Image (cartoon, rainbow, N blue to C red):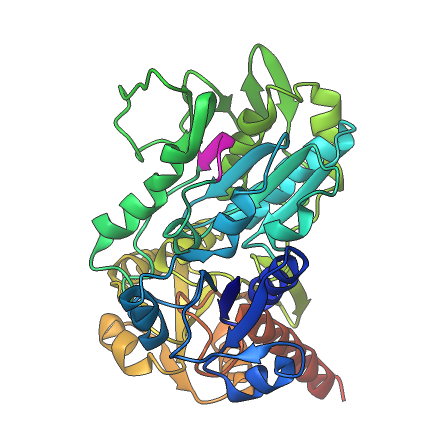
Amino acid sequence: MNALIVGLGISGISSAKFLKNSGYEIFIYDDNAAQLEKYSAEYQKYDGNLKYDLAVISPGVPSTHRVIQKLSEQETEVIGELELAGRYVKDEKVIAVTGTNGKSTTVSLVHSFLKNAGFRSFLCGNIGEPVINGIGKGYEFFVIELSSFQLETLKSLKVDVAMILNVTPDHLDRYKDFEDYKNTKLNLLNLLKKGGTAVLGTGIVDKDFRHPGFDLKLFSVDGTDDIKCDETNVYFDGKKLKVDDLKISGHHNVENIMAAVLGVKKWVSDTGILRKSLLEFNPLAHRTAFVDKFQGVEFIDDSKGTNVGAVEKALAGFDDGKVVLILGGVDKGGSYAPVRVLAERKCKGVVIIGASKEIIRPYFKGFKNVETADSMAETVEKSFKLAGNDGVVLFSPACSSFDWYKNYKERGDDFVNKVKELKAELEK
């Protein structure tokens, strides 16, 4: 049998290894010639005239790609790595999390809760480790972060808990409109096992929505019948979980905690275990992470803030009139108007960078302090000056990173490094 791997990233190579061990002859394709050459000694290159029994595509490869179109013409089955893995999941419990923002923090919390309760849990999916790598390894739980791209080709995976945290405009360069994007996220509910649990942020479905096939739990910082919070605690099932002195903060992280608690409560409800996990939990890199503070200016790295909704949540956690916001990168097709509205109250300045500069700039026409920059070093310097020895420089770009960088991690690392270099220069 012949299998084609389209896209030679982490999930693609993991799929190739798995299928090779399962008896398939492996063929590979990638638009990146260097990446293709890297693996050409181990696997055969794509031949457009060959008939394939199966094709596994990476999440970033759109259905309009010429190779995918050719495969469709040949009536080849085209699936993603997660769909491949889903066909081999047996007795493992599956907790799957999607949403526009907060996915990585929430799955990490769920994974931590389960591990501290003594379960063998595998953290996987969009957060980094491919699900296929956990097949047959003796795990009791798969905790999976799912992007909308991954949900497009997912049918066979059956989940015990489906969590949809929030849905705000994103990836409108890929989907025809917001409803198309939202419906892709809602596809996760179709994967729920009968009697499973759906954990949803309020507003995703109508508050009176009920489904006979699964148990619905809703969460919000405004409170629901299922879980509530105040300034210091989260309350559920008559229990109190203290959250006011954690290393993660902000309303968005309280909601992530609430979602995670609801997601695991069938297996972990001991507040001692939950509290221990929360106290040990550190903010994930590039997600409103503190970088440094000097000469009265605090620097925050939120490079993972790749959409407008994420920037709104990040800005909401800071004092009014204190923030210098860094925006820009590769535009994803949405409106920046919500950021401009919030910036009127929260921001003392804005620095716009990257390929989307001319798209974002009109939204800030008439704003008091707007700068543009052509490098990360210039961005950090101008932001520091706008902060004026009393403020917060928030790098939350609302865009993807592919104009200047490989990914948001490389972008965030560069921001952190340039902050360090500026500090060293000022201390000379």
Nearer to the camera, 155 or 394: 155
Q: Is residue 88 visible?
A: yes
Q: Is residue 26 left or right of residue 216?
A: right
Q: Is residue 380 magenta?
A: no
Q: Is residue 24 left or right of residue 328?
A: right
Nearer to the camera, 332 or 367: 332
Q: Residue furthest top?
A: 238
| Figure check: 253 above or below 301 | above
Please state the horizontal and vertical placement of residue 164, each as a whole percent of the image.
Answer: 42, 38
| Figure check: 167 above or below 396 | above
Q: Is residue 159 magenta?
A: yes
Nearer to the camera, 76 or 417: 76
Please tell me which residue is depicted at 29% across the width and 52% down the height of the picture: 181
When asked about the image quadrant of residue 335, the answer is bottom left
What secondary structure prevails in the magenta region? Answer: strand
Q: Is residue 300 visible?
A: no
Please state the horizontal and vertical placement of residue 172, each as a whole percent of the image.
Answer: 27, 62
| Figure check: 73 above or below 135 | below
| Tag count | 0
Please tell me which residue is depicted at 57% across the width and 82% down the height of the picture: 35
Please tell me which residue is depicted at 73% across the width and 83% down the height of the picture: 424
Please state the horizontal and vertical placement of residue 129, each as a whole percent of the image.
Answer: 64, 55
* Quarter of the figure with the C terminus: bottom right
Please state the horizontal and vertical placement of residue 78, each as a whole percent of the image.
Answer: 40, 59
The span picked out in magenta is 157-163
| Figure check: 419 above or below 209 | below
